Amino acid sequence: MIIRSAEFVKSAVKPSQYPEAALPEVAFVGRSNVGKSSLINTLLNRKRLVKTSSTPGRTQLINFFNINGTFTFVDLPGYGYAKVPKSVVKTWGDMIETYLSTRQTLKGVVMLMDIRRTPGQDETDLIGWFQHYHIPTCYVLTKADKFSNQKRKVHHEHCGETLGLPPSELICFSAKTRLGRERLLDHITPWISE
Ligand code: GTP
Ligand code: MG
């Protein structure tokens, strides 16, 4: 994929604030601090298009990015940040479910999970939504550079088993080494090239 342009379009919390639903769209979702913004920057070969931070829970809005004028990437707010009050968790869930269920141009979701963490109820719930709304999903294990090859393989298989998915459906990814970038692009390119 050749990235000719990548621009921030706008932030939104509700459908009336979304940009016009005109271009095919791919959304990125995962726990706070899992590496969503870093992954998007790596895919787009941009250093700082999407703000990254070492403080979890910074991205609390739905952020839309226009790429090449032909498709849209959406950075969804992270979940599971312990210091966030219950009322905010509910708002997050409503915001995500509304987006997933109403966005006509959504072609697929990239679901990010930290390779060092066993997937839990939050991940199972999200996968339930993707299935319920018939949204094609690509699963990515982030921060794969944190492990040696051998440990990575063990954790990769463990995450697959926990989710009930074959390891071949989980892409190991690193924003640091760019591991998995080509595989992920191969997966999402058909979603955005209609
Ligand atoms: P929120 O928007 O706050 O939910 O976080 P996020 O999911 O967008 O994560 P972000 O990309 O901001 O990264 C969080 C932290 O993890 C930053 O300190 C990144 O440098 C680090 N990080 C992200 N991806 C990787 C990776 O592949 N390898 C390593 N070692 N660190 C990473
Ligand atoms: Mg972010």
Image (cartoon, rainbow, N blue to C red):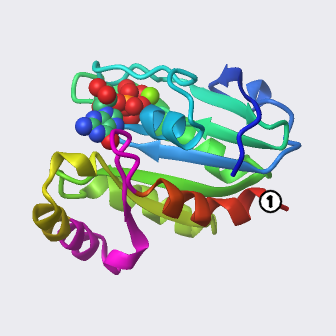
Q: Residue at x 62, y 38 (%)?
A: 74
Q: Identify the image quadrant of the C terminus.
A: bottom right
Q: Nearer the viewer, residue 52 or 83?
A: 52
Q: Quadrant of residue 166?
A: bottom left
10 Å crowding of disc 1: few (<14), some (14-19), many (20+): few
Residue 172 lies in magenta, yes or no? yes
Against 165, residue 5 (above or below) is: above
Against 2, residue 148 (above or below) is: below
Against 45, residue 140 (above or below) is: below
Kind of residue sitting beneath label 1: Ser
Q: Which residue is mark 1?
A: 193
Q: Residue at x 84, y 43 (%)?
A: 70
The residues colored magenta run: 156-179
Q: Nearer the viewer, residue 122 or 142?
A: 142
Q: Quadrant of ligand 1?
A: top left
Where's residue 67, x and y in %? 74, 37
Q: Is residue 182 left or right of residue 151?
A: right
Q: Residue furthest bottom?
A: 166
Is residue 34 visible in the rendered image? The answer is no
Where's residue 165, x and y in %? 35, 77
Q: Is residue 125 left or right of residue 193?
A: left
